[in-house]
Amino acid sequence: MRIFMDTANIDDIRRGARMGVVDGVTTNPSLLANEGVEYRDRVLEICDVVDGPISAECISSDPDELVAEAQRIAAWHPNVVVKIAMSESGLEAIRRVSAEGIRVNTTLIFSANQALLAARAGATFVSPFIGRLQDGGHDGMEVVREIVTIFETHGLPTQVLAASIRSTRDVTEAALAGAHIATLPPNVLYQMVHHPLTDAGIERFLADAAKYAAV
Ligand code: G3P
């Protein structure tokens, strides 16, 4: 499973990239709203730091406007993937722009059937929102498992991008469920590095090394 970062904060993206484990970035209007910068400018900054798929979201609702917006956003940089939300208009736009070679990440996926429709329309990625399903008392990972099974059973090339990840446990479960990618908030990525026994072990090795270093 590949690791993406789910943030528009450039300092976090630089930190994640330095760790050498970040294969892509997902952004959305809510994440950009915290940054106080132009969407295009920030996406181009991110493209300079991470050489992989960088998702940027369309906000139009009319299919023709969605197509025009997706074409405009996709032209920002070859690594840009356009995010289009699941809806009838969204599916129409996905079909039209994916036929032109534009890669689409279908966002706000909450069921296997929605993912199936997005895949049939030509989406490159589908993003089931695990945390928001769990917030509503549903089993988000079951939805991921269903989507993975359906795509494998029917030979659909669309990749499952587990989104709305809230904890390190979600990452493990997304990997076990067969997600191709998980997009992580920065704090979840940083927490994954640590284990209390690792941290205590490093401290003890350093304390012991100080004893012989001194002689
Ligand atoms: O990638 C989608 C993600 O940003 C949504 O996360 O935490 O707002 O449900 P959240």
Image (cartoon, helix red, strand yellow):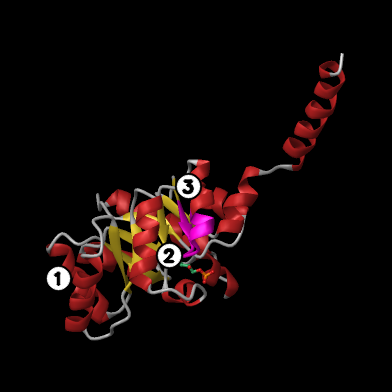
Residue beneath label 3, please?
17
Q: Amino acid at mark 3?
A: Ala
Q: What range is drawn magenta here?
A: 4-13
- Left or right of 148? Residue 95 is left
Point out residue 75 in the picture as x, y percentages from the top left corner: 21, 65
Binning the other alpha carbons within 10 Å of mark 3 as few (below 14), some (14 to 19) or many (20 upward) gives: some
Q: Is residue 93 above or below residue 77?
A: below
Which residue occupies 71% across, 42% down?
Answer: 195
For marks 3 and 1, give the CA distance: 33 Å
State which tag comes first along the sequence, 3 or 2: 3
Could you tell me which secondary element the residue under label 1 belongs to?
helix
Q: Secondary structure at mark 2?
A: strand
Circle nearer the N terminus (3, 1): 3
Residue 94 at x, y percent in the picture: 22, 70
First of labels 2, 1 by sequence position: 1
Furthest-bottom residue in this view? 62
Count every numbered label the image shows and give the total: 3
Few, some or many C-alpha atoms within 10 Å of disc 2 (few <14, some 14-19, many ≥20)? many
